[in-house]
């Protein structure tokens, strides 16, 4: 496995990871949640993170999004060592995380959700008057670029379908122009058609050159969309291969540890 | 349904939405005031048919006077309810703040304006203190504010000891203010001016929408704006047909305009609703959740102080009996009947006013037709129960897709 082991910029090399984790470990008291995990994401690539319950997926996601800090190992962004101590650190670098349930306010509409906390103003009453037209046009542009179709932007998102809601949550993350986007179980609890919607959206993110990290229980999803699959087991990286080299049964074997 | 992997287009199969779903959606958002307006129209029709004076300019002026305090407090309560908190101490605070004004003006000869500023500041600081205790401890607002309500009654007794408790306000500037009516010209000019500003904002909005290539319906937007202006001028004309627009009503109208703008057109307002809708999402979006909640409590405190003074000016006195809990019940009932959700995240400034009108009209009309107190309480309570059940049903259907 090749990796850019130096600290210098390996600028604009197509193969250089945007985000690279090396030897990551995390311990909770006596419990080892992660140990010696290496993990890379490149531009325009979907990396899936698979593993059984307790394998360490959530811990790794939290480390990348700055919610918890690792005890061991190094994190490189664009080839430079960084520390991710709080969510803002990750956001400033361009790492956005979309959590399953916690992203949207059901009582607000699409535009209000997309711009929550970074509302836009215009005209003389700067700062004291929202510019709904400006936000709506930006929202439309962002959603169109992701091929997301929502008929009425002023309907509260609680009324949208699960797929549309997930799309709005992802679009919200994309609006801040991240380079890496983490999706935590984006298709959980979605029906067939809605799952297809979200999968298409993930493909769009890849086309737009984002590095996508996908955490999913759904092996079908993972095999459908990922370019590379990383399997965690009991806090360690059990396997990592391009998707073409995985089958459903080999994936199951790697996840459960019956592949030896 | 076949989904091929090559087809990478997110076409949402339009979910089959039933008529009932559509109706609930409309009722829970933009049409939320429609059922309230209909109930109000029904109540007015019933009383008008039973009493020839119910719709007289004089009685409608009385009605406005009667609901002024409830409305002012309900305006603030809406903000607190929207962030999914509650304040049960408003009746006590209103009385204490009125007591402060009474003691300062009558016993200490302080000018009314200074006394008012002090009382409103006390109300605001009180809200901030109470709010900070709630948000930082995580204790339920409902119990904390109940405790504060008891303490305020104690404070009121300290301020106005039982033996010499009544502070008469007759002959003070407060009596003058309570009786003050706007000059006729001003009474039309003010709403017209505010209305024109509103129209200008709608027009500007339309221009921007067109510039950004968004759909916009100028005629509709203007028609609504003009209708609102004419409606307010008609209301002013009713007041002027009797003795003119009371100062209290003018102040209330100003508060409605300011709060309606703040809650719908500023980030502050959107953030309040966001917190009530999904606290965690709001926090992650960088919204200072605790500060916003404290601000809501504080604004409620200031409005409650003002409401207390208005109530005292109306009866020309404050006493330990002023901490009448019916203010609390009526203000909460007004907010809820108007469509404010106790679950947080839903409710508007208009809800508070319409709700106050509904319960105020019932009380006023029942009195006019000589209905018994028993009947009045039964009807008012019934309306409140119906409103809160309707709210729960709407809330349950509110996010059918997510829950
Ligand atoms: N906050 C915590 N405190 C103690 N142990 C934890 C904590 N978070 C995770 N763990 C432990 O770390 C291991 C990995 O958990 P997690 O990352 O949640 O796995 P996954 O998301 O793959 O199911 C588990 O054994 C879990 O019990
Ligand atoms: Mg997990």
Image (cartoon, coloured by chain):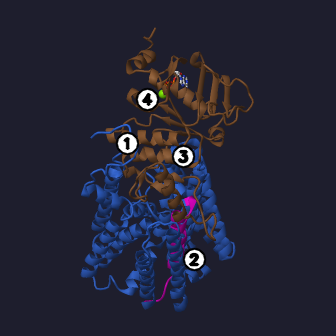
Asked if marks 3 and 4 fall on the same chain, the answer is: yes
Residue B247 part of the magenta-drawn span? yes
Mark 1 element type: loop
Using the numbered discs, state the Cα–Cα distance from disc 3 to disc 4 in whole angstroms. Answer: 21 Å
Question: Which stretch appears magenta?
Answer: B242-268
Which of the chains bears the disc numbered 3? A
Residue sitting at x 59%, y 33% = A42
Q: Earlier in the sequence, mark 3 or mark 4?
A: 3
Looking at the image, residue B297 lies above or below residue B286: below
Kindly identify which residue carries mark 1: B7
- The image shows a total of numbered marks equal to 4
User: Which quadrant does the C terminus of chain B fall into?
Assistant: top left
Determine crowd level at label 2: few under 14, some 14-19, many 20+ residues with C-alpha closer than 10 A.
Answer: many
Where is residue B104 drawn, in percent x and y? 66, 70
Kindly identify which residue carries mark 4: A222
Query: Could you tell me if residue B4 is visible in this image?
Result: yes
Which of the chains bears the disc numbered 2? B
Kindly identify which residue carries mark 2: B169
User: Which quadrant does the N terminus of chain B fall into?
Assistant: top left
Kindly identify which residue carries mark 3: A174
Using the numbered discs, state the Cα–Cα distance from disc 2 to disc 3 in whole angstroms. Answer: 62 Å
Looking at the image, residue B386 lies above or below residue A249: below
Nearest to the eye among marks 1 and 3: give it: 1
Residue sitting at x 51%, y 45% = B281
């Amino acid at each position: 496995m090749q990796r850019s082991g130096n600290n210098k910029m390996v600028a604009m090399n197509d193969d250089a990871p945007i985000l690279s984790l090396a030897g990551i470990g995390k311990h909770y008291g006596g419990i080892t949640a992660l140990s010696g995990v290496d993990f890379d994401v490149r531009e325009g690539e979907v990396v899936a993170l698979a593993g059984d319950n307790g394998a360490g997926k959530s811990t790794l996601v939290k480390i990348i999004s700055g919610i918890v800090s690792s005890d061991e190992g190094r994190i490189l962004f664009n080839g430079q060592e960084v520390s991710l101590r709080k969510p803002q650190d990750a956001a400033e670098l361009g790492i956005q995380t979309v959590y399953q349930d916690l992203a949207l306010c059901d009582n607000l509409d699409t535009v209000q959700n997309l711009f929550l906390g970074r509302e836009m103003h215009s005209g003389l009453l700067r700062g004291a008057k929202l510019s709904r037209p400006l936000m709506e046009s930006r929202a439309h542009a962002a959603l169109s670029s992701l091929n997301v179709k929502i008929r009425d932007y002023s309907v509260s998102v609680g009324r949208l379908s699960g797929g549309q809601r997930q799309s709005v949550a992802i679009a919200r993350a994309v609006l801040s122009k991240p380079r890496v986007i983490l999706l935590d179980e984006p298709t959980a609890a979605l029906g067939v058609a809605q799952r297809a919607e979200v999968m298409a959206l993930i493909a769009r993110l890849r086309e737009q050159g984002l590095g996508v990290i996908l955490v999913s229980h759904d092996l079908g999803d993972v095999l459908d969309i990922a370019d590379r699959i990383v399997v965690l087991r009991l806090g360690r990286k059990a396997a990592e291969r391009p998707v073409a080299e995985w089958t459903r049964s080999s994936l199951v074997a790697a996840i459960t540890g019956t592949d030896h | 349904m076949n989904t091929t992997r090559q087809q990478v287009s997110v076409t949402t199969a339009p979910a089959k939405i039933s008529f009932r779903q559509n109706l609930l959606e409309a009722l829970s958002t933009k049409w939320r005031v429609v059922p309230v307006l209909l109930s109000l129209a029904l109540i007015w029709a019933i009383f008008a048919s039973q009493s020839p004076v119910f719709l007289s300019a004089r009685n409608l002026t009385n009605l406005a006077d009667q609901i002024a305090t409830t409305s002012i407090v309900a305006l603030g309560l809406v903000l607190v309810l929207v962030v999914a908190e509650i304040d049960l101490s408003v009746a006590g605070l209103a009385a204490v703040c009125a007591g402060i004004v009474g003691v300062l003006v009558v016993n200490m000869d302080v000018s009314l304006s200074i006394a008012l500023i002090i009382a409103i500041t006390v109300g605001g600081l009180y809200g901030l203190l109470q709010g900070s205790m709630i948000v930082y401890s995580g204790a339920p607002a409902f119990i904390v504010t109940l405790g504060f309500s008891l303490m305020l009654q104690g404070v009121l007794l300290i301020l106005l000891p039982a033996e010499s408790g009544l502070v008469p306000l007759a002959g003070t500037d407060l009596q003058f203010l309570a009786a003050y009516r706007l000059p006729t010209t001003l009474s039309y000019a003010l709403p017209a001016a505010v209305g024109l500003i509103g129209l200008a904002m709608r027009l500007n909005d339309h221009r921007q929408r067109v510039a950004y290539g968004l759909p916009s319906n100028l005629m509709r937007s203007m028609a609504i704006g003009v209708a609102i202006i004419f409606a307010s001028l008609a209301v002013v004309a009713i007041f002027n047909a009797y003795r003119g627009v009371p100062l209290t009503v003018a102040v209330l109208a100003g508060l409605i305009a300011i709060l309606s703008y703040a809650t719908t057109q500023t980030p502050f307002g959107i953030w309040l609703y966001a917190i009530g809708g999904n606290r965690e999402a709001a926090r992650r979006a960088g919204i200072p959740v605790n500060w916003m909640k404290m601000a809501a409590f504080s604004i409620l405190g200031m409005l409650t102080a003002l409401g207390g003074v208005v109530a005292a000016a109306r009866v020309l006195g404050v006493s330990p009996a002023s901490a009448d809990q019916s203010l609390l019940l009526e203000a909460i009932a007004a907010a809820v009947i108007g469509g404010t959700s106790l679950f947080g995240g839903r409710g508007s400034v208009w809800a508070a006013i319409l709700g106050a009108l509904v319960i105020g009209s019932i009380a006023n009309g029942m009195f006019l037709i000589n209905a018994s107190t028993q009947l009045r309480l039964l009807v008012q309570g019934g309306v409140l129960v119906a409103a809160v059940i309707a709210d729960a049903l709407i809330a349950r259907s509110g996010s059918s897709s997510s829950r």
